[in-house]
């Protein structure tokens, strides 16, 4: 695995292409209502990067502000859920890290998750059994980077 290399990814139709350059600051599968409703899926795996490590190569991200200061990026043509980013100007103390959905990477196994977060919000039929930590809410590391404001709105 090229942990410090760069990886490209994009949406299903190919209109949006991006590159991230390792390392990731945080990797997790999220089950929160906001992520899962946005994607129409029961879970979303994310890898976060410092903003300078994310680069759009082709196309543009359409965005939806799912809660104040939280921007979710997607392809306007095919709808693929691609990014998540906080606006520190709106959310005091938040990092402006860019998260990408790891399934949108050309190598979706490049940044495997370290933990499950917001596991308590999962749909009732879903049970994930593996050796990773399952956090009902968010992990300390997650909270540390102020990534948890979907449940800590101001
Ligand atoms: Zn697309
Ligand atoms: Zn989430």
Image (cartoon, rainbow, N blue to C red):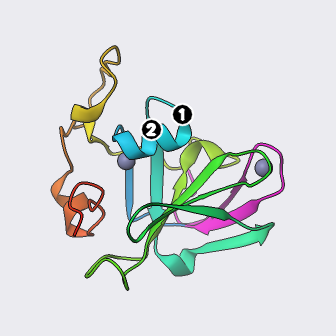
Disc 1 + disc 2, Cβ < 8 Å:
yes
The x, y position of residue 38, in whole percent, is 51, 44
The x, y position of residue 102, in whole percent, is 55, 47
Dot label at residue 36: 2
Q: Secondary structure at mark 1?
A: loop
- Image quarter (top left, top right, bottom left or bottom right) of the C terminus: bottom left
The residue lying toward the viewer, choosing from 146 and 71, is 71
Image-based side of 71 in relation to 12, left or right: left
Q: Is any atom of residue 49 visible in this view? A: yes
The residue lying toward the viewer, choosing from 103 and 40, is 40
The residue lying toward the viewer, choosing from 47 and 39, is 39
Vertical side of 105 occupied by 43: above or below: above
Q: Is the distance from the Cβ of mark 2 to the nearest ligand 2 atom less than 8 Å? A: yes
Q: Secondary structure at mark 2?
A: helix
The x, y position of residue 5, in whole percent, is 60, 65
- How far apart are the alpha carbons under marks 1 and 2? 6 Å
In the image, residue 13 lies in the stretch drawn in magenta: yes
The x, y position of residue 83, in whole percent, is 56, 59
Q: Quadrant of residue 75?
A: bottom right
Residue lying farthest to the top in this orientation:
125
Image-based side of 101 in relation to 154, left or right: right
Q: Is any atom of residue 112 visible in this view? A: no
- Where are the magenta residues, as a range? 1-21
Vertical side of 34 occupied by 99: above or below: below
Instruction: Please report the residue visible at 47 percent of the width from the left and 55 percent of the height from the top.
Output: 47
Instruction: Please report the residue visible at 22 percent of the width from the left and 38 percent of the height from the top.
Output: 133
* Residue assigned mark 1: 40
Instruction: Please report the residue visible at 35 percent of the width from the left and 37 percent of the height from the top.
Output: 31
Image-based side of 18 in relation to 140, left or right: right
Image-based side of 97 in relation to 64, left or right: left
Mark 1, other Cα within 10 Å: few <14 / some 14–19 / many ≥20: few
């Amino acid at each position: 695995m090229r942990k410090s290399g760069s990886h490209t990814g994009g949406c299903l139709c190919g209109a949006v292409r991006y590159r991230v350059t390792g390392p990731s600051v945080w990797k997790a599968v999220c089950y929160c209502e906001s992520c899962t409703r946005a994607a129409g899926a029961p879970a979303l795996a994310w890898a976060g990067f410092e903003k300078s490590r994310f680069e759009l190569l082709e196309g543009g991200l359409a965005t939806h502000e799912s809660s104040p200061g939280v921007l979710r990026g997607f392809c306007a043509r095919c709808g693929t859920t691609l990014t998540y980013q906080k606006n520190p100007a709106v959310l005091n103390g938040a990092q402006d890290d860019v998260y990408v959905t790891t399934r949108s990477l050309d190598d979706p196994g490049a940044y495997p998750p370290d933990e499950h977060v917001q596991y308590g919000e999962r749909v009732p039929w879903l049970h994930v059994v593996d050796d990773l930590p399952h956090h009902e809410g968010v992990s300390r590391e997650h909270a540390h980077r102020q990534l948890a404001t979907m449940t800590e709105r101001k």
